[in-house]
Every structure is written in C-alpha cells, then in structure tokens.
Image (cartoon, helix red, strand yellow):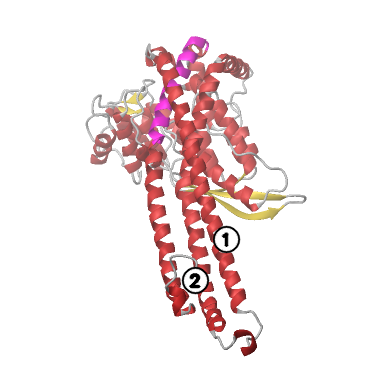
Amino acid sequence: MASTDLSFGCIPAFYREVYEKICSPTSGNVEREVFKSLLVKSQLSSSVLSQIWELVDSKTGYLTRSGLYKGLALVAFAQQGKHPSDKLLENSESQELPVPVLGDLSEVTLLAQRLHKGSNPAKLNLTYSDICNLDTIEVNLVPEKKGIFLKHVEYQVTSKRFNSVVYRRYNDFVSLHELLLARFPYRLIPKLPPKKIVGADSQFLEERRRSLLRFLTVIARHPVVSKDHIVQFFFTYTGEETQHKIREVFRRVPDEFATSELSSRAKELVPPETLTEFANSRDQIRVILLGISRLKNIADCLAIRSHSYAVDMAELGTQLSNLASEPHGTTAWATGGSTIWQEMKKGFHIISKEFNLLSTRALQQAVREETRVCERLNLLLDVLVAHRILCERHERGVSADHQRALSTMLSLKKRQMQGVIRGTDSDTVEYLENKMVAQESVIANVELRNCFSLHCLHMETQLVHAHLEILATVLQSLVNVQIRGHSELAEVWKLIEPTIMKCLPEKSTSGSNGIS
C-alpha cells in the first residue's frame, strides 16, 4: 500500500462525481462490493482488476475517499496499457490524474443506494420490484440437434444484466445447481425439473423449459447468489462442454460461510427470539404454500377449460361446415316445397368460420392464463418450496457442512505445502481460497456456522415475504385476462347472432325462451 494521499490535490472532477454517487451518506466510505462493481465497468481483464484490488484493499470491507481515488487512477493507467503500481501514483503527484473510461454507472449507483438503504445486514430492505430489476431472463428451445444415437435438446439463455446470449443443455443446468447448493447451502436454491431419458414429447419439453426459466429467474434475482462468479460464468461462458468446464473452474470453491465477512460476527446477527420466530414463520409459510398450491390448481383448471372450449368450438365449426357441404340434393318429394334446409346450409357455411375464430380466441385466452397466471404462481411456488427445503436442511444440522469445510481447508493446506496452489482455475477461486485461509479460526467454529445458517435463514424468509407480492400481481392479471377473454368471445358471438337469425324461420325466433 502506498502512503500517497489522494484525498486532495490534482484530482479530476470526475473522481469527485463518482465519489458523490457511490459513497455512504453516513460514513463517507465506499463499500467493497460497490467498488468491485465499478471495476467491472472498466472492461479490464480479471487479472489486472485483481492487481488493482490488491493495491487498494484496506482489509476493512470498504474504501475511503482516498482509496477510491487511488483505484480510479490505477484503472485509468491500466486502460492506457500501464502495469498498475504504487510507483505510477508517486510519479503523478504533481500532475492531474487520468480519467478512466467506465461507461454508464447507473447500475453501480443503484447498487450503492440499495446497500446504503439496507446497511443493517439483518434487514433485506428489498421490494419485489427491486428484485425484478436485478435481471430479466429468457430461456427458449432451439431446434433439436441429432446426435449419433439421441437427439439433444438445447436452450438459448438470455440475461439482460450480463447482456449475454448463451446456449445450454439440461446437464449444464444440473452442474450449476449442484455447484450452487455446495456454495450456498443456507440460501434458497430452487429444485430443477426432472430429466426424462427417452420419449420426451413437446409438452414435456415445454414444461421443462418453463421450469428452467423459473429456476434461472430465482437465481438471477437472488440478492446474494446472483453476484457469485458461478452465476456469471453460467450466463457468459461461450466455450464448449459447459457442464464440465464450470465444474472444473469452480470445483474448489468453498461455501459461503467460509468466505463471508459476516461469518465472524454471526452470533451478533441472530436475535435471541430467532428460534421462536423461525418456528412461527415456518408454520405461516407452510400455510401460504398450501393455499397457493390450491390457487394454482384452480388456475390450471381455468386454462384447461379454455383449451377444451377452443377444441369444442373448432369441432362445432367443423361439423357445421360438414353439414353445409353435405352432397345430397333436396327434392320437392323430400321437402314438400320447403327451402329451410337450403337456407340453413348457406348460414352454416358462414358461421362455421366464426366458430373457428371463437376457437382461436379461446386458445389465446388459455395462453394468457398459463403465462400470466399459472406461471407466476409456479414461480411463487418454486420460492416457497425452496424455503421449505432450506428449513429441512437447517434442521438436519450443519455438521456435514462443517466437516466438508474442514476437509476443504486441509486439502488447501496440502496444496499450498506442495506449491501447487496456482493452477488452471480462475483468479476468483484463488481469491476465495485466500479468504478462507484468512478466517481459518472462524471456519473451525461450528457454533458460528450454526448462527450463520440461522442468519441466512432469517434473510431468506424475508426474501420469501418480498416474493409474496407476486400473488397480488397474479390476481390483478387474472381479472384483466378474464375481462379481455370474455369480451373477445362476446364480440365473436355477436357476429354470429345475425347469421343464425337469418337461418331460422320467422316463427322459430319467437320461441327462443324454451324448446318449441
């Protein structure tokens, strides 16, 4: 660390503007997480960013104004092709420091505001709207590719946050899921849909696509998990064999407790009433889960009825068209001179097309019910079920996680002794391992791990309550979908009515209140 004081002197106005945007309004410091988000905006390589971080890291979890200015200067020098070092700063004391190119800082500013708003680590302080703003994910099926023996289903995955489009197979999702469970054993990690080895029809593939979309949506919008490098890798890696590469790069990553800055003070974060509150909230969420499950069943029935209605209207139109086209001529011998059947056949031909339109409108209604009501309820159910599974994991205890962490620490020490700590893995893994070594005494304390698990459970419960806002949006969507659907169907029925009236003899129209 250089002793150069960059809090005054030849400082560009840009430095002060950045500081005012991202500093804490109470302490005046810049959170480490905010500064790292700022570093990413520089588009420098991860190795260069690691060097800059090492030069400015005060080991306190935040940067002072001087530390921020130093980091901005080092970024600007690095963008000029210079190797980051304290010497660069010492040689520039009498000159105005260079200005880095960082692009749009609105995302960094929002992160700073959110962190300052939620400076209490025991308060989530996020609305569902805040959660949705973290990312928007799309998952779409791409045309099947034939392998030597089997067809392989591939998905196009899009992330708004990373501005990325990648292609993934189901086993890539499995690798991600397993890594996230190991990295975040005390967080909400939704279940994956099942893998069907053979006979996967289009309906199964569509249901699995929707389930994978929900899985990634919860992960990408999780306030802690979404920031992990495992998630970033999944959304941005464009090489081959993603399922194997992601395991190779992150196989040594320790769990969250082993690297979190909150681990050492986990006891402070767990209020005395936590166990009682945990039991009460768990019962409450169990009741909510049951109620939402029943609402989901009702919504499914609505969508199924709309599909059935569409099928019935299409069949009705087909049969009327068949009647309109029946080939037999009509003689006076059969009709006695009546022309009613001929007139009705003409009407059938016209209104059969309207019944096809009814079928189309009903199908559109079913799709709206599935996407705007059923799928949103499914997303809420995924979160609620993930919470139930998390509670079960906590009740089973942290002993297995504790032993796994100790084993990881022992393996790490052996590699250090053998001088093979630097391998082909990313700088991120090495950085996390170094953090693990730095708090070895914390990792060895199983009581702290248990408290950390309770703290995470507390935060995840708050996250569940933030997601409950989904139900309000679902009910609003249900009302809007039903109003629109019934209005569109009524419009078509009104088009049919005049034609029906023309097909009927005048005396038949007067007996419309009963069977005549």
Residue 42: image x %, image y %?
Answer: 40, 41
Given the image, on which type of amino acid does mark 1 rest?
Answer: Val
Give the residue number, with chain letter if any, for mark 2: 354
* Boundaries of the magenta span: 444-468
Give the residue number, with chain letter if any, for mark 1: 311
Q: Tell me if residue 428 comes above or below residue 503 in the rendering.
A: above
Q: Nearer the viewer, residue 51 or 502?
A: 502
In this orientation, does residue 91 appear? no
Does residue 138 belong to the magenta stretch?
Answer: no
Q: Secondary structure at mark 1?
A: helix
Q: Secondary structure at mark 2?
A: helix
Few, some or many residues within 10 Å of mark 1 (<14, 14–19, 20+): some
Is 423 on the left-hand or right-hand side of 214? right
Q: Can you say which quadrant of the picture contains the N terminus?
A: top left
Which quarter of the picture shows residue 267? top left
Which residue shows up at 44% across the image and 38% down it? 221
Given the image, on which type of amino acid does mark 2 rest?
Answer: Glu
Residue 90: image x %, image y %?
Answer: 32, 29
Is 385 on the left-hand or right-hand side of 462? right
Q: Any mark on residue 430, and which? A: none
